[in-house]
Amino acid sequence: MPPSVALPTLSRIDFFTAEPDELVRLIGNAVATDSTVIAPSDAHLALAAWNDLSVDVPNGGFTQFFYNHRGDGGLAALCELLESLDLGKAASMLETATATYRKYRDRFDTTNPWEGLFGSIPEFDALDRKFARIGPGKVALALSNWARLHLDDLVVGDDGQPIDQKFTGTVETYFPGGAVAQSLCVKKGKADGPWREFFDDETVRQVRFYKSGKASGDYWPNGELKRKQSKRGTDKVLDWYYPSGRLEKRLVLDKNDQQVEPARLYYEDGQLAEEMTLLGGTFDERYGPWLKFFPDGSPRLQGEASHYGTPRVIVHNAWDDEHRQVVKDGTGLFDDDGRRIDASYALFFESLWRTVSELKHGVPNGLSRMYKNGLLWSVTPHVDGIPQGESVHYYDNGRVRSRHVFEKGREISHRDFPKFDNPEPVVRLVLEANEQLYKGWRHMPVDDYPAALNLVQIQDSLNIPQFLREIQVRNQNGTIRSEY
């Protein structure tokens, strides 16, 4: 490529910390976001096309991909590249997808794909399934390996220079004022040592440790270990720690990433807080005893889960926050707050959903009330853990959304209801500033979180967008074909 042609910029830290199959994604994103790249090469278009496919097809199929990009740009170059990498099946599939798109091109000329586009092209249904079978990870790895061989023709580093794939030393990025934003130790082209991210006042935001390109541990800003991975024989041990250095969570996995002992959460003083076995790494695949404890060691929950059949969870005994027993020998009112151990990187999973169920024999017998973000979502009667009778679902304004009739767990009828009798468009601004948000974005906690002083005035000054007014008119005329 002529040196006068601008190449997209790639973060060197992202490059040195990337997994083997991630380079195609990084370059694809760089091509899409770098405004200095006016005339991307065929190779750029090919890698960007695969990056878009790997996001859109699993989400909404090939229909989603061609609608999002209003065409098949980059696919011809991608097919040619795949053929050269002996990935002919993948290339053939994409060629068929391109021909199918061109056959139905007129259907994509719409502002609302939910009205007549999505689900209307049966040929794409088969291609969507085929995409999953070809092994997208295998393709991404092959494209990433090819990109490494041609890296100097594809990108430049964020210092404006070609990326040295054998580099040894420290890579730093900077804030506009000159303070270090990130630093990473690299050895022979692989992240090896600490990676640090800083706030603009030069205090540490987070720390992670790498060994031969693999993340082996995270650190709290105070320097204490936050997370590490180690070996115990052939098993893999994943440990999470409090800022004090005390153990907070432990997972032990075999070589196939299956649990060999229950996942455990601990209070900071070492007292066991929760214990659960996750067969496949998710809460839907829990199995065996499910136990929770109060900080003083007294029981909070005694239950068990079965991976097969319905119901999945049997609650034997449970206590509320005041240590009062609310379920005894399987009978009582159980309040499931949705929070439980997570086998992923997070310490635990906090659901938006909360369920309060009348129990007998450890399973729902009577009414189960489900709440979303604190608002009633549904009330469903159960017999022996199975829905039986009429289940009523609600909108967030309290009106009935739908009524469903169940017979031995099988839905035999349902009826939907409108949220409003005469809906009118409105524009609402929702602002959030709290501990959970700051923690999620890795910001330092503060004593007082900011609040808008003129939110009402700003919201009152906003105009209703024209497209919402058009939807209102169509709704009044009865011409809307979708609830989307």
Image: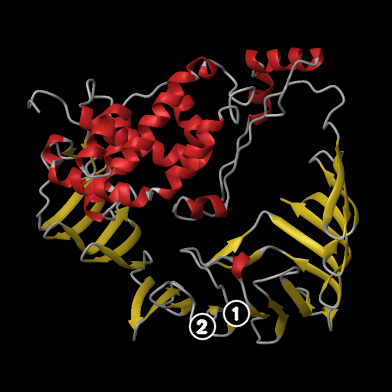
Residue 179 at least partly seen:
no
Q: Which kind of residue does numbered mark 1 sit on? A: Glu
Disc 2 versus disc 1: nearer the observer:
2
Look at the image and name its color scheme: secondary structure
Q: Amino acid at mark 2?
A: Glu
Q: Residue at x 66, y 86 (%)?
A: 296
Relative to residue 40, is residue 363 depicted above or below? below
Label 2 crowd (10 A; few <14 / some 14-19 / many >=20):
some
In x, y percent, where is residue 477?
80, 12
Give residue 197's quadrant in the image. Answer: bottom left
Residue 202 position within the rendered picture, expressed as x and y whole percent measured from the top left: 29, 52
Q: Nearer the viewer, residue 325 or 411?
A: 411
Near mark 1 (Cα within 10 A), the count class, few <14, some 14-19 or many ≥20, is many
Q: Is residue 224 above or below residue 191?
A: below
Image quadrant holding the C terminus, namely: top right
Of pointers 2 and 1, the one earlier in the residue sequence: 2
Q: Which mark is residue 275?
A: 1
Among all residues in the image, which is located at the extreme left?
3
In the displayed structure image, the side of residue 443 where residue 207 appears, left or right:
left
- Residue 261, labelled with which disc? 2
In this rendering, position of residue 430 left or right of residue 197? right
